[in-house]
Image: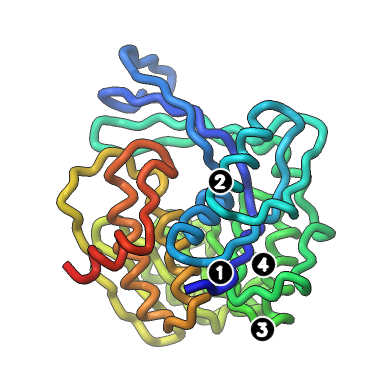
Amino acid sequence: MNGRVVVVGSINVDLVVHADRLPLPGETVLGGQFARFQGGKGANQAVAAARAGASVTMIGAVGDDAYGTDAVRALADEGIDTSRVRVVEGPTGVALIGVGARGENTIMLAAGANERVGEEDVELDSLRPEVVLTGFEIPYPAAVAAVRSARRLRATPIVTPAPARAVSAELLALDPVIVPNEHELTVIIGNDDPAAALDELTRRSGGAVVVTQGPAGALLAVRDRRERFNSVRPKADVVDTTGAGDAFVGALAAWMAGGASLEEALHAANAAGALSVTAAGARGALPSRAAIEELLRA
């Protein structure tokens, strides 16, 4: 399975503190353990897709610091084409992540070099992708340009609307596959009722909407159709949920790039998401294609 996936997105370093519980506003919690991981939703999705069997190219930017050097090397070590990752003056993006005892997390992000990704970076003709992944940890115009280029090249565009923000009519008119969690769903439409927000989103866009729901799996919505895809459970305990959404989207892209239907890809994505929470760090347990297939058989 060597379908071509292009990821236009963020590249960060994750600075993670594990503690017995997450602090309340204004509170300090002592006793946490610190670790540093490679991250960024774009880079994590690229790694997830590569491990799931896709041929992946990363488009993004890192700073001219040690974090940036390490980030590009880590992507290359996964077999990802990094020739379209620019090195710019300034810091690489950094995410500060707190993880509680049950694997729940909070995230603060300093975008750094990710803010320098522009529409001029999104030239996809020579890459001939089957799937293009993008999200909102890079400037919004670059994400829209990625979706527009995907449509022009008859590739499938997938958008992860995180961090959540209102989406434009221009983007929705391009009918991408949109993959929000339940919080992001309400924010991108501006309606606090998830069901009503989903109805409005499917009225405004002809593309599929896949609402990720953690252990409950995912809900597929296409216009008036609603179908639930239940999650699968690995035997290992939950350790860290930070990268579950990226594992889900990366596997979804890899399966679709390899010729699978959206429905087939959703089963694989659920399995990938379930496997990803069994180790620390957003990339710590991003699963291989073999592991995903083994869980699906089980």
Secondary structure at badge 3 equals loop
Question: What kind of element bears circle 1?
Answer: strand
194 to the left or right of 46: left
How far is disc 2 from disc 3 in space, using C-alphas? 29 Å
The residue that label 2 is drawn on is 77
* Crowd around label 4: few <14 · some 14–19 · many ≥20 (10 Å): few
Distance from label 4 to label 1 (Cα)? 15 Å
Give the amino acid type for the residue marked by disc 2 in the picture: Asp
Q: Residue furthest bottom?
A: 224
Q: Earlier in the sequence, mark 4 or mark 1?
A: 1
Choose the circle earlier in sequence order: 2 or 1. Answer: 2
| Residue 133 percent coordinates (x, y) | 59, 64
In space, the residues marked 4 and 3 are separated at their CA atoms by 21 Å
Camera-near label (4 vs 3) is: 3
Q: Which residue is mark 4?
A: 168
The amino acid type, in three-letter code, at marker 4 is Ser
Q: Nearer the viewer, mark 4 or mark 1?
A: 1
Q: Is residue 199 above or below residue 25?
A: below
Which numbered marker is on residue 154?
Answer: 3
163 to 37, vertically: above or below: below
